[in-house]
Image: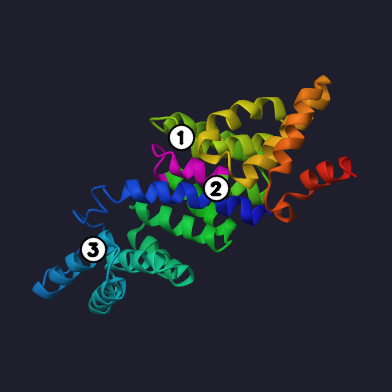
């Protein structure tokens, strides 16, 4: 259940990050973190490879271009990163991690893009502890960015240190320039996991536009609604909670504590 939950939250957020980040100065191909080979062939294929990635086309050719550059100069960290990026776009995440890891190592903590892509791809693969390590490094070397703090909070849903996750998510929330429904949804989940059900409700409300049809939203929201209704003896909330749970499509994937509560009550 935890892996399904984190995957759903993560994929939504990672897609948003990637679609925005592709327009950044680095991902536009305007600079490098390591010295770029200056021969005519290298300059040509490097730019062609990045163009393929930006268009999400001819990814095999793009990977071949970057692999050629790595063979020519195995200290060129940017070629490793772009090779990893082509692999990630091709859903070859295990292979992508190898190249992202090499890029991050060679860049010596200079690149937020390398660490972020390495950490998030690790999370797809379930390598949460290594992802946490990289998110911690993002906070250390790029404290102005919300992404490291957000990543720590995301990994806390599987690692289990929910309080620490909430602390970091609160920091991330202050660093995002606009209201972020992904952050609101994750905060609602963490508050539910931490037993702060009353507080969680307003975060479910503020993320409902994007996530209301999500099974994890419905099940966790139902759980918090039920706990608040039980505490305050409000039958209307209890009824609403049961209705939300009844609309969960894949009940076999719901967190056991939630499933037991609603299914035993209905017996």
- Identify the residue at image location x=47%, y=46%: 13
**Residue of label 2:** 9
Q: Residues within 10 Å of mark 3 (few under 14, many from 20)?
A: many
Nearest the camera: 101 or 66?
66
Task: Specify the label residue 50 is tagged with.
Answer: 3
* Residue 222 falls in image quadrant: top right
* Residue 262 falls in image quadrant: top right
Marks 2 and 1 in Cβ contact (< 8 Å): no
Q: Residues within 10 Å of mark 1 (few under 14, many from 20)?
A: few
- Identify the residue at image location x=9%, y=72%: 40
* Placement of the C terminus among the 4 image quadrants: top right
Give the structural element (helix, strand or loop) at label 2.
helix
Regarding residue 112, the answer to whether it shows in the image is no
Tell me where the magenta segment starts and ends, as one range. Answer: 141-153
Q: Is residue 145 magenta?
A: yes
Task: Specify the label residue 20 is tagged with.
Answer: none
- Where's residue 85, x and y in %? 35, 64
Q: Residues within 10 Å of mark 2 (few under 14, many from 20)?
A: some
Nearest the camera: 243 or 27?
243
- Where's residue 6, x and y in %? 59, 51
**Residue of label 1:** 180
| Circle nearer the N terminus (3, 1) | 3
Q: Is residue 178 left or right of residue 51?
A: right
């Amino acid at each position: 259940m935890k892996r399904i939950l984190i995957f759903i939250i993560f994929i939504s957020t990672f897609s948003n990050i990637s679609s925005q980040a592709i327009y950044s100065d680095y991902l536009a191909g305007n600079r490098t973190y390591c010295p770029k080979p200056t021969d005519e062939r290298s300059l040509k294929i490097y730019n062609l490879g990045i163009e393929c990635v930006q268009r999400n086309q001819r990814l095999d050719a793009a990977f071949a271009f970057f692999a050629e550059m790595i063979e020519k100069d195995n200290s060129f960290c940017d070629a490793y990163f772009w090779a990893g990026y082509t692999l990630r776009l091709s859903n070859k995440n295990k292979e992508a991690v190898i190249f992202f890891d090499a890029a991050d190592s060679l860049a010596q903590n200079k690149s937020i893009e390398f660490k972020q892509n390495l950490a998030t791809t690790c999370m797809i693969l379930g390598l949460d502890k290594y992802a946490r390590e990289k998110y911690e490094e993002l906070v250390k070397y790029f404290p102005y960015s919300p992404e490291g703090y957000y990543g720590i909070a995301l990994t806390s849903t599987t690692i289990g240190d929910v309080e620490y996750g909430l602390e970091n998510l609160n920091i991330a929330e202050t660093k995002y320039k606009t209201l972020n429904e992904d952050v609101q949804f994750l905060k609602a989940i963490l508050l539910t996991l931490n037993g702060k059900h009353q507080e969680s409700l307003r975060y479910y409300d503020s993320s409902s536009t994007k996530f209301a049809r999500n099974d994890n939203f419905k099940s966790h929201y139902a759980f918090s609604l039920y706990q608040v209704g039980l505490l305050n003896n409000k039958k209307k909330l209890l009824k609403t909670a049961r209705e939300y749970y009844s609309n969960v499509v894949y009940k076999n994937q719901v967190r056991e504590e939630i499933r037991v509560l609603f299914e035993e009550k209905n017996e």
